[in-house]
Image (tube, grey):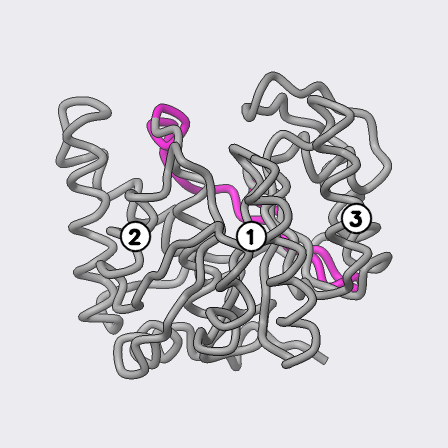
């Protein structure tokens, strides 16, 4: 049985800086450069490509695959399937960010077909995306989400259905392995003013998946982002300075993991 009290979360941060894992990002054009900068800030190494002709080779070379469907294209979608199948074949850890799931029929079909590859150990989205994937009602506005009280049930349903770790981000973050559901009510509201903040978390989860099991990786990433956002906000005048301070603090915590106090995750009875 998973015991939070026995997990050394600071070791996860340290192990990433020692290993410097290569994360193959198949991500959206809005946040691509930001995710590359963040990967370097936390001690990982990024590579970005949506070209089908090299997707399999990059999966083979990388430690982790991250697929984010935010700005899809015909060529990019083809590359995602090549990469997902190769990750499945090689047993490489992979994470799927179903950006905008439910907003259009194309996105719904694309995510469902990607999940059919059975390549993904983590599915991470906002509350609305994960609620819809988990069979609950939700309202989606572009890539933003309306918070749903049924999100906690949805993460458990989704994790159980796909034998993975399901993650829903929002004012309350939820994580489930299909057996238990954990909640974290931390973080600063200015994260909602950074269009790539959810993508940042995907990069962090991918990095941590290279050194620990997916559940711990997901919980570490969400906790670190929540605490770092609160610290950054205290030093910032607005979203612009907040973004810069957030990167600095994530970098500092990664280099000095003993200074990071893991917030308390609540285990829900669901």
Which is nearer the N-term, disc 1 or disc 2?
2
Identify which residue is drawn at 78% across, 25% down. Answer: 105
In this picture, which residue range is highlighted in magenta? Answer: 172-193
Residue 113, numbered circle = 3
Q: Badge 3, how many Cα within 10 Å: few under 14, some, many 20+?
A: few
Which is nearer the N-term, disc 3 or disc 2?
2
Q: Badge 2, how many Cα within 10 Å: few under 14, some, many 20+?
A: some
Secondary element at image label 2: helix
Residue 132 to residue 193: above or below: below
Q: Relative to 91, is 209 on the left or the right?
A: left
Q: Relative to 61, is 242 on the left or the right?
A: left
Identify which residue is drawn at 37% across, 32% down. Answer: 191
Q: Badge 1, how many Cα within 10 Å: few under 14, some, many 20+?
A: many
Residue 38, numbered circle = none
Can you give x and y, in whole percent of width and height, for residue 123 in the image? 65, 53
Can you give x and y, in whole percent of width and height, for residue 83 in the image? 60, 63
Can you give x and y, in whole percent of width and height, for residue 51 in the image? 49, 52
Choose top left, top right, bottom left or bottom right for residue 101: top right
Disc 2: which residue: 36
Which is nearer the N-term, disc 3 or disc 1?
1
Q: Residue furthest front?
A: 53
Disc 1 to disc 2, C-alpha distance: 14 Å
Q: Relative to 93, is 106 on the left or the right?
A: right
Disc 3 to disc 1, C-alpha distance: 13 Å
Disc 1: which residue: 67
Identify which residue is drawn at 84% across, 50% down. Answer: 157
Identify which residue is drawn at 69% across, 72% down. Answer: 88
Does residue 187 appear anywhere in the picture? yes
In this orientation, which residue lies closer to the viewer: 62 or 263?
62
Residue 39 to residue 190: above or below: below
Secondary element at image label 3: helix
């Amino acid at each position: 049985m998973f015991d939070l009290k026995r997990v050394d979360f600071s070791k996860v941060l340290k192990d990433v800086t020692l290993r410097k894992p290569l994360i193959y990002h198949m991500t959206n054009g809005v946040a691509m450069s930001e995710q590359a900068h963040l990967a370097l800030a936390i001690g990982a190494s990024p590579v970005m490509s949506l070209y089908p002709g090299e997707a399999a080779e990059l999966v083979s070379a990388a430690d982790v695959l991250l697929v984010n469907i935010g700005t899809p294209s015909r060529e990019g979608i083809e590359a995602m399937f090549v990469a997902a199948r190769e990750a499945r074949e090689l047993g490489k850890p992979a994470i799927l960010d179903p950006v905008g799931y439910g907003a259009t029929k194309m996105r719904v079909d694309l995510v469902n077909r990607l999940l059919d590859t059975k390549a993904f150990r983590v599915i991470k989205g906002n509350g609305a995306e994960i609620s819809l994937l988990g069979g609950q009602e939700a309202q989606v506005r572009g890539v933003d989400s309306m918070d749903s009280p049924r999100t906690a049930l949805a993460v458990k349903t989704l994790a159980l259905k796909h034998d993975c770790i399901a993650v829903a981000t929002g004012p309350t973050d939820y994580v489930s392995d299909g057996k238990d559901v954990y909640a974290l009510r931390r973080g600063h509201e200015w994260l909602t003013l950074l269009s790539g903040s959810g993508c940042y978390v995907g990069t962090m989860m991918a990095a941590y998946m290279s050194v620990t099991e997916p559940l711990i990786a997901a919980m570490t990433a969400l906790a670190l982002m929540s605490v770092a956002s609160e610290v950054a906000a205290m030093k910032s005048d607005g979203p612009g300075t907040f973004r810069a301070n957030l990167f600095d603090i994530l970098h500092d915590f990664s280099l000095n993991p003993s200074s990071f106090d893991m917030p308390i995750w609540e285990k829900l009875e669901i």
